Amino acid sequence: MSEDSNPIGEAPTGGLPLALAKRRVLAKLLGEAPQAVRIGRFVLERELGRGGMGSVWLAHDEQLQRLVALKFLRSDLDPDRGDPRLLGEAQSLARLSHPNVIAVYDVGSHEGRVWIAMEYVPGQTMREWSAQDPEPRAVLRHWIAAGRGLESVHQRGLVHRDVKPDNVLLGEDGRVRLIDFGLVRSVDGREGQLPSTEPALRRASEEEASPTETGAFVGTFAYAAPEQRARQRVDALADQYAYCVSVWEALTGERPQAHPPVPPTGAARGLMSPRVRRALTRGLDPEPTRRYPSMGPLLAQLESRRGLWLGAAALGLTLAAGLVAGTTLTSQAPTPVPCSRTDAALERTLSAERRAALLAGLEPGAAAVMAPLLDDWSGRWRGAAQRSCEEVHVEQTRSPETLDRRRACLDNSLVELEVVLIALEGGEPLRADPFRHIQDPQTCLSPSLLEARAQPTLDPETAEQAAQLRARLVDLRIGAKPVSFEARIAAAEDTLASIEALDVPALRAYALETLTALTTTAGKAEDAHRYAGALIDLAAELDDPALLAAAWRRKADIELELELDVDAAQWSAQRSMELAAKLRGQPRVYARALVARGRVAFLKEDHQAAARDFQAASEELARSGPSNDGLRARVLRNLALALVALDDRPGADAARRSALELERRTPLEVGVQAQGDKHYGDAQDAMDAGKHEEATHAAQLALDAYAAEFGPDCRGIADTHILLANVEIIQGRFESSRTHAEAADRVLRQRFGVLDRDRFITQTALASAAFYERDFAAAATAFGLALELAQHQHQSDEDLALLQANLGEALLHDGRVLEARAMLERAVAQLEGTGTPERAALDVPRKALGATYLALGQLDAAQRELARARANLERHGNNPLELADATWLLARAELGLERRPQAQNLAESASAQFGALDLPGKENEIQAWLARYF
């Protein structure tokens, strides 16, 4: 009978399950063992899966006594056209041996149908495994293994055409294997179809189409490259695209929907490092020619840099080992050239292609600034890498352990560079001169690096995690994202906590240094001291003189910038200088130590010593290339201040011109200032005219323009915040005024230094806000600091007199009345002697002096000064808050002189004025006074 001669009938495509089921039923009925179904030496046991390309069965190989997966091609293919072709490609797969590709044992054809016998691997697909929320590093590690398998397929001249999570198997043995070659084809363009292992293939409406339909799409639409979706000829680059889709999905939980793909956000952001994101983005390019030329370079980018850093230098190590052992290299083997590819890691981070694309995406002015900075930094990195390698493998003057230390240092510098590059590529605004915030690669050659205590060797997973944490700290340092200092500090503290769990002391030091800098800039003296102290202790424990010098210098910064404790700062700066002077190859550390000592000397009025230190620091940085131009500009501005104090005006002007030229060559200064200046002028005019809402609106426009043109910490930003602080305090919005004053002070301290000419203004604004919030002790302290800064800056006599008046008023309200009277009388007399006696600058000091006389019971003097102040404030019309206060004080003086009608009218007027300013506390105080006396 026909069925007996072909017992499997239409098997193995559609009828085999039914045939086996019938045999089992029959066996039960007959009480006998079911008859086995055989294909050659394979005995079929059960079906594992079925798809549009055919079916896969668990079978027993009787010859080799092992279980195999036996795949059968669908029976509706044209055997005359397809089977020989498929058989040849199956045989190619059988010759492929790779640990990350499912092993093919045998291939054959049975009654016109192709079958392929493969290893049977119990396990789960990557899609099933990923659903269990595995650790991200394990996800990436498994997909890199799958990529190695795909690379080997391509090297055999085949294309998979259906790479996706369902076609990558994670075996119970822990090994990853690429499976399901149902759509495999050779690179010569002839397409073939091998059976699929997946349980089911959805139709085109469900992202897939049957490959047997003429001209139909083949593969899985959601993962397919654009050229594959368009039914064009595909090659290994299409597999690369599908692979990148799969990896992106595995790491973020979503497939990329556009190019460039939207970076992951929220919790998913932490699952993909910038290096991995950049590599996948290139592999996902819609244009095949812009992807990686093969899987190898892509996988190299996905892998951790550790172990890949010096490339050919490893050959140098092999050569040296051979010479030490006394072996002879034969003429047949090519002699490896040591240190011939020391820049391989840099090329992976900043290739010529990436550099060109980055610069093309910038504004022309920004590109002109950024190009030499990138090239200088890259050149310094190459020089350090080459020298590190040659000293070990060519000159043999240092041990391999020194190369490990320097390699780690240079790797860290590449992590920092990557953060800057990503920010630039994403169009994110950077702080002034990002190269000032990342490591100079030449410091990796410093002897102090080798003198410090050796760091523990990290396994690849820990090293990758450490790199991501370092990148996060760099991102917080350069301020690429517009978040508050409070948020940046909180993020840095979270990062420090993660680092503590890793136990990587050098990285912990970097986090402490970051937190010291951030808290200092934010004006948080207590926190800054705490982090600086921890940094000093850790630097001493690590026996790292460069880090210790930097830590003491940061402590001096805190004492100068936040406390103006010159004596304490002098000790800290001298300690930093003693350590830095012994260093070689650390120009930034040495220059910054000189600056710290110079600033102390300036505040102690030793201007000659200050100028010497600032000049020496400038010269040190000048020898270090344009990457340090931003820092050098700040030093030159300090030098100009010292030269002014020495009455060397020509020298000061020259230093300022040099600083300005350097600032124009830093990223912050790229742009045109006209719009920001225009809006700032409009805001100033509106404030002078008493149009406060217009002033606020124009000032906000100025902030936006300055930030867009110069970045978030240019002088225009500080000036505008000072203006807004003034506008807000005039309107009685004290908390908002303080916020703007603090923002201005941060910019000035960070960008221009503690001695900047405008810091006395920000301190005055902070003191004014504290005064009107009735924190008179804090106001007196801030006014005192403002006065001291103004004196050191050699401000005008009028400015000094006004600050004395402000300080006097704060002393008055703090209960120090006699001190206040002396201070205010001196200030008013000085102001009257420097201009017309009725000008606006005298209004508030006169009011304060009148209030002091009132407090001391000198009523006639109080009435005289307050009436004069009130009349002038009313005439000038630009300070309603001070007018209301002067009116209220004058009412009390008039009552003391028993002029009740005048007192009542003035008090009622003052109450209305405070009410209009939305100050109900003052309004209620006056109403209570009226009720008591009238």
Image: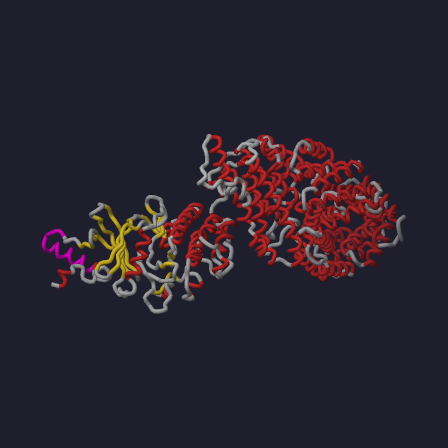
Q: In the shown orientation, is residue 351 left or right of residue 839?
A: left
Q: Is residue 913 above or below residue 502?
A: below
Near-viewer residue (877 or 385): 385
Is 154 a magenta residue? no
Residue ID at (56%, 37%): 390
| Residue 853 placement (x, y as % from top left) | 84, 45
The residue positioned 60% from the left and 42% from the top of the image is: 383
Q: Position of residue 438 (x, y in %)?
A: 61, 44
Residue 574: percent from the left, percent from the top?
71, 32
Magenta range: 17-33
Q: Is residue 831 visible?
A: yes
Hey, which quadrant is residue 538 in on the image?
top right
Question: For this rendering, which residue is in front, 428 or 84?
Answer: 84
Residue occupying the far front of the picture? 331
- Relative to 704, residue 588 above or below: above
Can residue 924 be seen here? The reply is no
Judging from the image, the colouring scheme is secondary structure
Instruction: Provide residue 160's location: percent of width, then percent of height.
Output: 37, 57
Q: In the shown orientation, is residue 594 left or right of residue 328?
A: right
Q: Quadrant of the N terminus?
A: bottom left
Q: Is residue 743 left or right of residue 406?
A: right
**Magenta residues, dominant SS class:** helix
Query: Could you tell whether 77 is left or right of 274 in the image?
Result: left
The quadrant the C terminus occupies is: bottom right
> Total of numbered circles in the picture?
0
Seen from this angle, which residue lies furthest bottom?
A: 214
Q: Nearer the viewer, residue 708 or 389?
A: 389
The residue shown at (18%, 62%) is 9
